[in-house]
Image (tube, coloured by chain):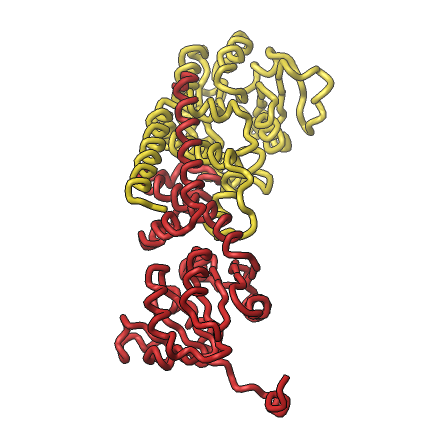
Chain colours: A yellow, B red
């Protein structure tokens, strides 16, 4: 510890948060972190007035948001590079940048390549959305991937302590391997079942009711969510092909065995 | 009403129940009805001693079980005809016979054809098993199909009042049409997912956890349950073909759109 740090008073200046992107998930982040930290939101799609309504949130330009202690990138993977380019000149040495994308290997690669060496990087995937977080985030899962610097474990500990989140430390590859099944299978099954509507809601079993609830949680997700999982998770094609191959095999065996 | 009936005292003799078949579901029936009615169980597979353990239950021959006021047939569809043949000579005029098979049109046809005209017939499908009824049957669903005679509605009312069951009156065809989707889809999806084990249990979403719970409720069902649904529900082949066709269509569109 340097002499200067030792002399610093205990009450540290409050951490500032820059939030780039104010879509559905950005708003959820602002709702939970807004009461605890000053949040500076930059979203090219928001007028300086219009959406400023969110409590404890200041709309600002890329320079102000990019100069915060912690910068959260809350946009789909395809917009990540443009967002990084906008804040890059303003990032301060020692700041931490994190993303919230639902795949982790590709954003890690992009952030490592395109963010300056003087910032730390953490990948996160909150495994919930505005829908599943409606009743609060306690007990919900978030995956935290160390990418550059030592911040991932303290962040995970903070999220557990402050929000009761089930924070899981993993590498981007470990995450993507599991998420390919978790999200890939959920969305594939939901897509097929939604095509079969009207689904029964009356003479149902307990297990079918659970299936319906699972489908209802993802059926209104933006189509980009599904295509992002299928296109940007390197393990998704294998999961998808195995699922469809097993389905075809089962179909064939049922026809062959003379099922009615 | 005859003179003799008018003179009968108000306290009617207790209804006796004959239970043919003492497998997993027969035992569940005995556990719930045993404390309320004398139950006479006939199962060729049970020695007169061995399984008699169940409380309030008397093991007996086909003649005694078949002579009860209410005779419950608790066996898979393929064994229905043999069970009817065994009790047929002993059925008393005015008795009611009901089945608990998970399809309804085929058992209705068999019972109508093979049971004597002097008994009433009700089809039932308790849409739960020992697994889902572990925490009690209150709120669980049972479909009740009038087949012959006026007993179905009073039975449904009794099951609602006494056990809190959600008793749904339907024709066998209405039941089979819904059940083909409810049970067909649950089992098809479960079969494919079980083949994909090990499934993730760590970095999961709320919707995937619901899928896993649905799978876990049916994965240990006897293989006959799955094949019975697929073979004996006249609507199952159409549901199955639509499901697999939609899956194949989705697979193709994902490959074509150059998803990773």
What percent of the width, then of the height, locates residue B185? 43, 43
Residue located at (64% from left, 33% from top) = A35
Q: Residue B17 lies in what quarter of the image?
A: bottom left
Which of these two is toward me, A157 or A74? A74
Which of these two is toward me, B55 or B78? B78
Left or right of residue B86: residue B10: right
Q: Residue B109 lies in what quarter of the image?
A: bottom left
Residue B171 in view (yes/no)? yes
Left or right of residue B71: residue B83: left
Which of these two is toward me, A251 or A208? A251
Residue located at (31% from left, 37% from top) = A252
Quadrant of the drawing holding the C terminus of chain B: top left
Q: Is residue B139 above or below residue A241?
A: below
Quadrant of the drawing holding the N terminus of chain B: bottom right
Residue B40 in view (yes/no)? no
Q: Is residue B150 above or below residue B63?
A: above
What percent of the width, then of the height, locates residue A189? 44, 35
What percent of the width, then of the height, locates residue B177? 50, 48
What percent of the width, then of the height, locates residue A221? 55, 30
Residue located at (41% from left, 58% from top) = B131
């Amino acid at each position: 510890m340097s002499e200067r740090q030792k002399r610093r008073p205990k009450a540290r200046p409050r951490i500032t948060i820059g939030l780039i992107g104010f879509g559905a998930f950005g708003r959820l982040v602002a709702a939970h972190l807004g009461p605890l930290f000053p949040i500076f939101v930059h979203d090219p799609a928001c007028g300086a007035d219009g959406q400023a309504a969110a409590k404890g949130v200041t709309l600002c330009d890329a320079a102000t948001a990019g100069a915060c202690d912690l910068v959260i990138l809350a946009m789909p993977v395809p917009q990540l590079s443009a967002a990084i380019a906008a804040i890059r000149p303003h990032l301060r040495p020692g700041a931490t940048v994190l993303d919230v994308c639902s795949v982790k290997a590709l954003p890690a690669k992009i952030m490592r390549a395109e963010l300056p060496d003087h910032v730390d990087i953490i990948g996160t995937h909150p495994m919930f959305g505005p829908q599943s977080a409606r009743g609060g985030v306690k007990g919900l899962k978030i995956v935290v991937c160390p990418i550059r610097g030592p911040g991932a474990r303290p962040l995970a500990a903070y999220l557990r302590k402050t929000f009761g989140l089930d924070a899981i430390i993993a590498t981007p590859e470990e995450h993507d391997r599991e998420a390919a099944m978790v999200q890939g299978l959920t969305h594939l099954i939901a897509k097929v079942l939604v095509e079969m509507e009207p689904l029964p809601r009356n003479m149902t079993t307990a297990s079918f009711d659970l299936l319906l609830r699972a489908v209802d949680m993802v059926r209104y997700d933006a189509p980009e969510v599904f295509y992002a999982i299928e296109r940007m998770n390197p393990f998704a094609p294998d999961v998808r092909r195995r699922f469809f191959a097993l389905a075809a095999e089962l179909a064939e065996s049922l026809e062959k065995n003379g099922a009615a």
